[in-house]
Image (cartoon, helix red, strand yellow):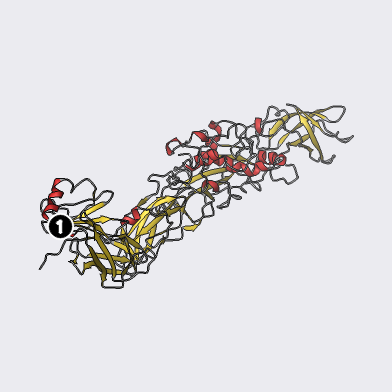
Amino acid sequence: MKRPALLAALFLIAPLILAAPASAARLVGAAGEVGVGSVSDEATCANSIPIPFGSAGEGSAMDADRASGAVEATITASGTFFATSCVGQNTSGYLKLNNWAYSGQTFQVQVATNPQGMAAISAFPNGPFVDPFSTQITVDSNGIGRSDTFYVRGLAAGHTIVSSCSPSIGCFNSPGPMDLTVTDLSAVDWVNDGRILTNPSSGGGKKIFADKDNPTSPSGREVQVEATASPGDTVYFKAFDVDDPSSDAAPIDANGALGDDNRGTPKAGTLSGGSAVADSTGHALVTLQLPAHPGDNVRVAAACSLEYLNGLRVSGTSIVDSTGTALPTDGAKVTEMLTVWRRVHIERDDMTAVTGNQTFGTITMIDATRKKLTIGALHSSAGVALANLEAGQYQRGLLTLPATATAPAVSAAVSTNGRTVVTLSTALPVGTSAAGRPFTLVDDDDYTSSGTLTGDEGRAVSAIAGLYSLLQDSDDPVRNVYAPSYIQPVYDGGGGANDATAPFRLNVPAGVVNSQPQINGSRGSTAADSSEYWVAYFQHAYQGDTSADDDPLSDDSTWGVTPYDGAAASSVVSEATVPAGGDGSLLYMETLREGGNVTPIVIQTLAPHELGHQFGLDHSPRRAVGLMMDTGMAKSFLPAELNALRWRVNSPGQ
């Protein structure tokens, strides 16, 4: 009997453990192809790593083999070849024969599976698919022949053997029959434990708060990914940093639609493993540790074949295979885009009730116009003796002469005041006894807008209407101006208590030496914040420095202050360049009320503006219209400010 020639068939398996007679002594590569050949006695290639052209099998030794009639066997890759395949997925290949003795001959070859039903073969990528399948090899004058490319499609989950035989020269025995695993990979998705929500921002998909629910809860950066496949089969996973859909321009996204633009390291997060075996219910699970920066976004692909998976790449917010076809395909599935959001937990404290905002004294003299009163013996309603008045403080205020046994009470609007003189807008009624009479004097403070001037004495200091209208617990950018930076406020106290116990101060003097102790003395969330639990603090104070409280109207107006370590947003280009920011802000309710009477927008923008300082943002550049401009006249951040916010990992003030 004639010894059958050694033929080579490339099906779907790699790596291959090959065995061949000693006469098939080398790995032979053809130009522009990748060859995997039979094992020689001199070199053991148990894993059959592909040998590129030129690395083996050329020169006089090859010519000598051909002259002696020795058989050469070559497996040559054409397309993508896998040991595993998905149901519905094609892999392609061809048969190649190197044999000098068969020059000029044509051989019919039949490719078949056993058992049948798991795969079928076709000459065309879209079928029809049959099993068995016939092809042929014509050997040229150089002893080299190859079949046309054919396609093997997975039909059903299971294991089958793919073999090829020629009626003229027998069955291929190098590398021999191929074991093919077909996996029914139907889906891959995020395991939703209640934290995965619909993402309202550009690009859609899902969102997750990749942080802690409370200071002592487990990390929120881990999320599970689940693929549905055939029980017992291996599924391969890979995470991808897809494009930032909110912008394709610097500074937010300097590389356009290319992806790989997350700020975390690693950019696509870290998978617990690159593969998992589906359990008896057909579920294969891995865990992804997400990047921590707000706005970072990822997708995870699952494939039946590691080789196919490694051919995937990012295209915008999509994942495509080596042919440019967007997932999902028959060979791989992909999760929806998952975008990282961060929460900032906010503690809010009120000052205790207003006290000391009424001035008592005695009228020592009244002039002939009955408008100008000289006063003395001054003290506040808190019992503090006053040497004199602040000039102009009581402009638009009210002076009241309480009733006596012989005279009724009299009130008159104040036009202005000096240090010891009060000028009324209208004259006291003729006959009103004034000299030596006690009085009560209040300015125009009325932060609740009650319409009655009492100096707000005894009123609790709390947030005025509209203060948090642009900083709501929402992912809607109309209600939360931080939503474009993927940050959402939560008013849960941040590990402290939202209460009304901050000690009242009529005016908090300017300077960090005054504002920081006022903040520190009442903030209860100081020990709670961390890189996975962001905390911010607001105190509803009454007024700032006496030179900036709108009393008189010629004063500057300071509506809020934040002691902070900041930087220009344009200088923040990495996590390392993010400034610490600040531990809290004082929001001056009465001064803000007066400013809002003139320019209502400042009531809405104050809290988000001061929170920006807690996040380390300086004021916007001159003439730039952004939320961090010092006039409070804008409701949105500049791109550089959004970029700086998205580089942050640590809590404000850290």
* Residue 265 seen: yes
Q: How many marks?
A: 1
Residue at coordinates 54% horizontally, 47% vertically from top-left?
A: 484
Label 1 element class: loop
Residue at coordinates 29% horizontally, 69% vertically from top-left?
A: 133
Q: Nearer the viewer, residue 11 or 60?
A: 60
Tell me if 116 is positioned left or right of 196 in this view.
Answer: left
Q: Residue beneath label 1, please?
A: 71
Tell me if 645 is positioned left or right of 117 in this view.
Answer: right
Q: Quadrant of the N terminus?
A: bottom left
Q: Nearer the viewer, residue 514 or 157?
A: 157
Q: Is 533 situated above or below 167?
A: above
Tell me if 11 is positioned left or right of 451 in this view.
Answer: left
- In the image, farthest residue toward the right: 430
Tell me if 617 is positioned left or right of 372 in this view.
Answer: left
Q: Position of residue 267 (x, y in %)?
A: 40, 46
Q: Position of residue 377 (x, y in %)?
A: 72, 29
Q: Nearer the viewer, residue 396 or 51?
A: 51
* Residue 524 seen: no
How crowded pointer 1 is (Cα within 10 Å; few <14, some 14-19, many 20+) is rated as many
Q: Quadrant of residue 562?
A: top right
Q: Position of residue 597 (x, y in %)?
A: 72, 41
Q: Position of residue 199 (x, y in %)?
A: 51, 55
Q: Quadrant of residue 333?
A: bottom left
Q: Is 54 situated above or below 428?
A: below
Q: Amino acid at mark 1?
A: Val
Q: Quadrant of the C terminus?
A: top left
Residue at coordinates 54% horizontally, 40% vertically from top-left?
A: 639
